[in-house]
Image (tube, helix red, strand yellow):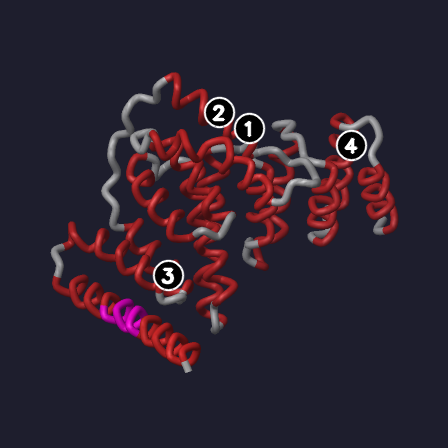
Amino acid sequence: MLYFTMICSFLAVVALGQNSVKNSIDLYREQIQKAPKDQKGELSFKLAIAYLNDQDQEKAFKEFLTALEACTPRAAPPVTNQQRELYEKGYSIYLDRHPSNSPKDTALKLYLELKQSADDHKEFHLLNLLMSTVYANLERYEEFFNVFYYSYPYYSDHYLSYKIKAALHIKLFEKARTLNEREGERKLVFQNIENAINRNALDVGLYKVVMIFAAVEDQAKTVEGYLSQIIEKNIMVSRNDIAFFVNQAISSKQLDLAQKFVDKSREWYQYSRSIAEAQEQIDQHR
């Protein structure tokens, strides 16, 4: 009987908590309708957190993006030597493309390296911008929302900000129910990734996303433009990614471009099975 009573008490507490979250959602939605424009962003941020607590990620991501759009850009304070050193150390880990490293593995390594410093220095907005990618990749979304939201106004034009927003739109793309919703999210992914590339052309992962999310009618042009950029700027691609880019060129019927990319890859790697396999693919389509 005691055990049954404890379960009932626990369920009552859970139900009370759920009601509290629902009430918060209703309250924030009502406040947003009545609030002046300069207060809507903060309320949207709080509503996004409430949606997370209600386990509704789709609404949380949408409302969080609304909150970001309402942010007023601020001038970033000078980056101290200490912050720059921490950021550069973390960024080198972030870009590590070793085949054995999944995004979560890299995020966990960054978490162990940077969390204490980021927590101790909330004013290090550039460092915390990088730290927000850690929480996102670890799917600790409430921490991600908090860290990114308060860093974003200082670095809204930073390549990581565009990349993070693209990642949120990818999540919404995956959750979209209609073709129109998917197309709207696809366009926003593509736009944000293009903005990210324009601000940092050396992040190879961006080129993969921009090709995947290009409009069907623009696929060939997109592949040609960005793969040519990789070749011309000598942006080294990991062995594991060679097949992806070759397949993109072959699929868009640009065999000469695929060959140029394979030739460039041979400058990066004296020997690679991936390059040999890519060459075989090109030869089979000639």
Q: Which mark is residue 92?
A: 1
* Circle 3 or circle 1, nearest the eye: 3
Residue indicated by mark 3? 52
The magenta segment is 16-23
At horizontal 48% and vertical 64% (from top left) the residue drawn is 183
Q: CA distance from mark 1 to mark 4?
A: 27 Å
Q: CA distance from mark 3 to mark 4?
A: 48 Å
> What type is the residue that disc 1 sits on?
Ser
Outermost residue toward the top? 81
Q: Is residue 15 above or below residue 126?
A: below
Residue 248, magenta (yes or no): no
Q: 262 left or right of 167?
A: right
Q: Is residue 81 above or below residue 90?
A: above
Residue indicated by mark 2? 88
* Circle 3 or circle 2, nearest the eye: 3
> What type is the residue that disc 3 sits on?
Leu
Q: CA distance from mark 3 to mark 1?
A: 31 Å
Residue indicated by mark 4? 263
Which callout, 3 or 4, points at the residue further toward the start of the chain? 3
At horizontal 77% and vertical 36% (from top left) the residue drawn is 262
CB contact under 8 Å: marks 2 and 1: yes
